[in-house]
Amino acid sequence: MNPDDPANTVRRLTALKIEHRDLDVMIARLGIEPGNDELELKRLKKRKLYLKDSIALLESQLIPDLDA
């Protein structure tokens, strides 16, 4: 498997987007529960932000470089 392969990048991007969406649901659920674990909530939010940055990086890699 070539790490520069666009199909590989798309698969990784899809997996990250799914994890990001799942974290969004978990964070929302933890946010409404009484007596929630604030530390766990912070960890999940940090992971979600990391995933967002990773998704943006992968999406930028899919844009072809054009010589102007």
Image (cartoon, rainbow, N blue to C red):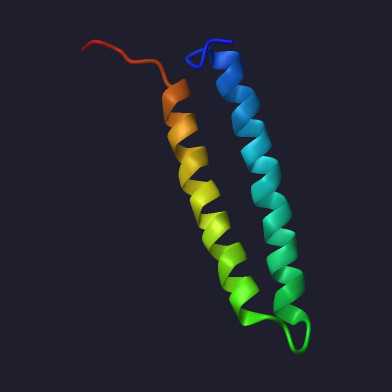
Query: For the image shown, how many numbered marks are present on the structure?
Result: 0
Nearer-the-camera pick, 39 or 68: 39
Q: Position of residue 56 (x, y in %)?
A: 46, 39
The residue depicted at 73 percent of the width and 74 percent of the height is: 30
The residue depicted at 62 percent of the width and 40 percent of the height is: 16
Q: Position of residue 13 (x, y in %)?
A: 60, 32
Q: Quadrant of the C terminus?
A: top left
The residue depicted at 49 percent of the width and 31 percent of the height is: 59
Q: Quadrant of the N terminus?
A: top right
Compared with 18, 50 (above or below) is: below
Q: Is residue 54 left or right of residue 17?
A: left
Nearer-the-camera pick, 62 or 40: 40
Q: Is residue 31 left or right of residue 64?
A: right
The residue depicted at 52 percent of the width and 62 percent of the height is: 46
Q: Is residue 3 left or right of residue 8?
A: left
Compared with 55, 5 (above or below) is: above
| Image quarter of residue 45 | bottom right
Q: Position of residue 48 (x, y in %)?
A: 57, 56
The residue positioned farthest toward the left in the image shown: 68
Compared with 2, 32 (above or below) is: below
Q: Position of residue 65 (x, y in %)?
A: 33, 15
| Image quarter of residue 7 | top right
Compared with 52, 12 (above or below) is: above
| Image quarter of residue 8 | top right
